[in-house]
Image: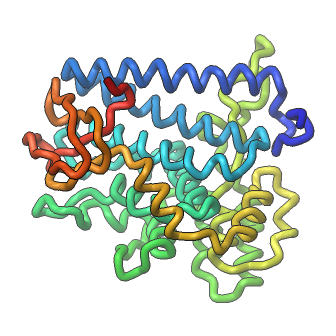
Amino acid sequence: MELHKRRRQQFLGETYYTAVLKSCDDGVEAVGSILRAAVAEGDIRYAHGRARVLAETRFDRLTLRYTAGEPIELLRSELEHVVAAYERYGDLLWSFRKDRNEVVFEFDVIDDYCQLMQLVGLCFLLHRRDLMPRIAALQDGVDATGQKGQGMGGADWVFEEFMSFAVGPEHRYESETIHWPKPYEALADALSSADNDAALKDLDRFLKHWYKDLAGTGWHDSHKPDENGNQGGYYGYWSFEAGAALLLLGIEDDSSLHKYLYYPKDLVAWAREHAKLSQEGATAESESLRLRCEAGHPCPKSGFWFTPARAGSRQRFEARQVMPEVGGDYGATIWQWDDQQG
């Protein structure tokens, strides 16, 4: 089917899509190669910056493909790769900063906060709740003993509410802070409402102001050509978190929200249609694609692995072999699957 017939937003043209998708694909390959070289040389300062670029490129690619109208089923496994890329960035960030309580997404940076909400929303809409604990690990930090626990947990109410839906409130933290009341306070009102009619009105209010209130983000108005007539940086405008909220609240009729260009109505419809998607299948898919393994745990897959905790650490492990601890400044050694085997 031609792009103009399947695309989910009218700003995306065939020539632009083809060029930007290729740029994303080339970027993943090129930056990945640079990242591996930097890690091998022990240049963690440079490597962690490249890892962030790689993760953002993967996220942009997923969003672009959704905007282009590609089948939603194809995006489920791609979301796993996005999360894994941010995990790799997190490992390198903590090694470079020597602080395991650094967060991957800064709550007080609007671009980071918005992207975190979108990522969380996609986990619910694509039925990948199995990824939510891994996203939580990017934000929670560690407690005073160095164990996983409340270091930065409870920093933001909206994030905590979504996490509570995923893993249960007993496993999450209390918070009274909403870092970006405009526009997210309306989303918080919807999530905390016991009345679905009121919650739907709150979601309408949230979406009404969503794009305008996010004018400070780097992607805002990116569909518009610059002074030279060039378009760049547009991958699609989507409030995936609004769709996730509607799904979690069990609101059946979302037709009043279809007027908003950035409400992912077909993704919500897909999520409803696949509500009985096997959780066992999602978990198996997650395990088959997992790219990280903490020291002390059995190797999930035979092949070459490396850890940013030590330069020149790349070596081969066999499946079920216990991954070794090599020491480091920020906690447990995290081994990462090397994309280049052999």
In-front residue for pair 338/89: 338
In-front residue for pair 32/224: 32
| Residue 268 found in image quarter | bottom right
Count the numbered circles shown.
0
Residue 94 picture location, percent across and down: 24, 42
In this rendering, position of residue 261 left or right of residue 139: right
In this rendering, position of residue 292 left or right of residue 182: left
Residue 234 picture location, percent across and down: 70, 32
Above-or-below relation of 107 to 198: above
In this rendering, position of residue 161 left or right of residue 183: left
| Residue 139 found in image quarter | bottom left
Above-or-below relation of 38 to 197: above
Residue 10 picture location, percent across and down: 86, 38
Residue at horizontal 31 percent and vertical 23 percent from the top: 342
Which quarter of the rendering shows the N terminus?
top right
| Residue 187 found in image quarter | bottom right
Residue at horizontal 71 percent and vertical 44 percent from the top: 66
